[in-house]
Image (tube, rainbow, N blue to C red):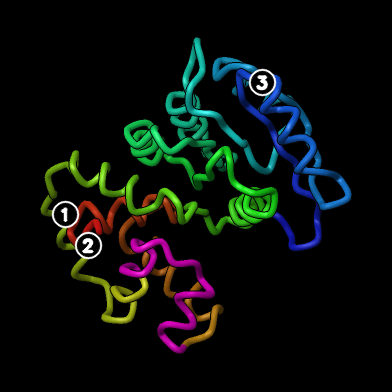
Amino acid sequence: MISEHADISVLLVDDQDLVRSGLRRILRRRDGFVIVAECSDGDEVAAAVTAHSPDVVVMDLRMKRVDGIEATRRLTQRGAPPVLALTTFNEDELLSGALRAGAAGFVLKDSSAEELIRAVRAVARGDGYLDPGVTSRVLSTYRRSVRERRPSDTVAAAELTVRELDVLTLIGAGRSNSEIAEELFISEVTVKSHIGRIFQKLELRDRAAAIVYAYDHGIVAPR
């Protein structure tokens, strides 16, 4: 996680020069972003991350040699940095795969510049980001391929307080911290405290994993 006023270093990963060019025009230094490197395929990502240590990787999902899901999985196994997946409306299965692989956020390729900037900043803060245009569809697809529950998971979920369960439910529904605070009439600081305890009790690494957990265990049902 970076400090609030620090520049955000970004690694762009997309096999289309035109897409990367468009991303460069949006994620400008004057708005607090630094493009430290670019990759045209997923097999180039590990070396670029080692060389440049970006705060965020903006990752396309469809690439020729190594796709975004596998590249995301490899980064997740290394522990950093967070991945913001670039998606389109017809990639539900790829999106659910990226969620399983550990992507911290999703944004549509045809989103506005403001939406992309918001998403990159959220992921850099460690909050995660799910584009409202794909959240319910992606998680519904994920839910259709749900894994079997394990006894240890059920025990872990039972350890949550009523308020923590409320927070987890809203995370699963795609709510931001500010929206959770408003709905539950608590402060954002309190929301973050609850989320930290949820992550610890359920052994979850990030917000995306919490959403997966909520859908896996029927805490949230697809709309």
Q: Where residue 18 appears, x then y in whole percent?
A: 70, 23
Amino acid at circle 3: Cys
Amino acid at circle 1: Ser
Residue linked to disc 1: 152
Element type at marker 1?
Answer: helix
Q: Residues within 10 Å of mark 1 (few under 14, many from 20)?
A: few
Using the image, tell me which numbered label, if any, was put on residue 22. Answer: none
Q: Residues within 10 Å of mark 2 (few under 14, many from 20)?
A: few
Q: Is residue 174 magenta?
A: yes
Residue linked to disc 3: 39
Residues under numbered marks 1 and 2 in contact, where contact means CB atoms less than 8 Å apart: yes
| Relative horizontal placement of residue 142, taking residue 14 as reference (left or right) | left
- Separation of marks 3 and 1 at Cα, in angstroms: 40 Å
Identify whether 57 is placed above or below 207: above
Q: Residues within 10 Å of mark 3 (few under 14, many from 20)?
A: many
Residue linked to disc 2: 156
Quadrant of residue 156 in the image? bottom left
Precedes in sequence: disc 3 or disc 1: 3
Quadrant position of the C terminus in the picture: bottom left
